[in-house]
Image (cartoon, helix red, strand yellow):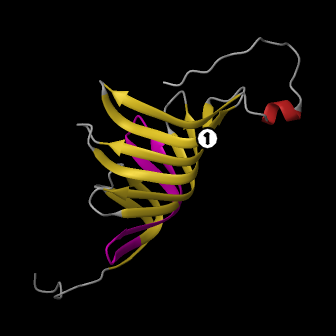
């Protein structure tokens, strides 16, 4: 999925300054993971960097489109930073993470991890899920990327707006 060029090898140890410098950088990139030709996700970022000895690519100003089994877009994730593990295609979004699905739900959190082989997003952080005036909050979340089937794991709280009639007696 992601190709990286290798420079000439050297047997000497890298200095701390060299270890922290990116091996490669790129601006305004786009990466797509597909399954049998159907997109699973598409990542766009303003800048990415890879480092020697790491299997991850680090991104800034991340935008990820998630797709369903038929290739239809189900949600969009944005974050300040991200990390893509080039071995597993797992992604971690960090900083001002927002996911908006096509049904009007919005998820906000500090960090969110896409687990590619499970096709799920996960976090242990505080989450806020809203749709209109309805709000759910709590800690920890497991969900499909379209936010259709989700579980907030701890300290769940919620409020709903525009309740027209009581739920009693239904």
Q: Which x, y percent locates residue 63?
A: 48, 48
Can residue 155 be seen here? no
Q: Would you identify the image quadrant in which residue 116 lies?
A: top left
**Residue 92: in magenta span:** no
Above or below, 62 relative to 116? below
Above or below, 143 relative to 169? above
Q: Which x, y percent locates residue 37?
A: 30, 25
Residue at the image point whose x is 70% and y is 30% from the top? 51
Q: Which x, y percent locates residue 40?
A: 35, 36
Residue at the image point whose x is 67% and y is 30% from the top? 54
**Residue 124: in magenta span:** yes
Side of 48 where 2 appears, left or right: left
Above or below, 108 relative to 132? above
The prevailing secondary structure element of the residues shown in magenta is: strand
- SS at mark 1? strand
Residue at the image point whose x is 53% and y is 47% from the top? 62
Q: Quadrant of the C terminus?
A: bottom left
Can residue 74 be seen here? yes
Number of callouts in the render? 1
Q: Which residues are magenta?
A: 110-136
Residue at the image point whose x is 39% and y is 45% from the top? 65
Q: Which x, y percent locates residue 88?
A: 50, 30
In this view of the protein, which residue sits in the foreground, 44 or 83?
44
In this view of the protein, which residue sits in the foreground, 73 or 110?
73
Read off the residue under disc 1.
Answer: 47
Residue that sits furthest to the front in the current view: 28
In this view of the protein, which residue sits in the foreground, 162 or 62?
62
Q: Residues within 10 Å of mark 1 (few under 14, many from 20)?
A: some
């Amino acid at each position: 999925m992601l190709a990286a060029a290798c420079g000439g090898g050297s047997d000497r140890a890298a200095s701390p300054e060299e270890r922290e410098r990116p091996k490669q950088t790129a601006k305004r990139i786009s990466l797509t993971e597909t399954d049998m030709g159907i997109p699973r996700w598409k990542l766009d970022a303003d800048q990415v960097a890879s480092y020697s000895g790491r299997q991850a690519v680090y991104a800034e100003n991340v935008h990820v489109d998630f797709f369903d089994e038929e290739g239809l877009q189900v949600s969009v994730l944005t974050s300040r930073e991200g990390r893509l593990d080039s071995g597993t295609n797992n992604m971690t979004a960090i900083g001002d993470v927002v996911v908006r699905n096509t049904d009007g739900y919005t998820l906000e959190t500090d960090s969110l991890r896409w687990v590619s082989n499970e096709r799920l997003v996960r976090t242990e952080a505080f989450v806020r899920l809203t749709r209109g005036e309805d709000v759910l909050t709590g800690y920890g979340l497991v969900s499909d990327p379209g936010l259709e089937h989700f579980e907030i794991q701890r300290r769940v709280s919620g409020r709903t707006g525009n309740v027209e009639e009581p739920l009693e007696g239904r």
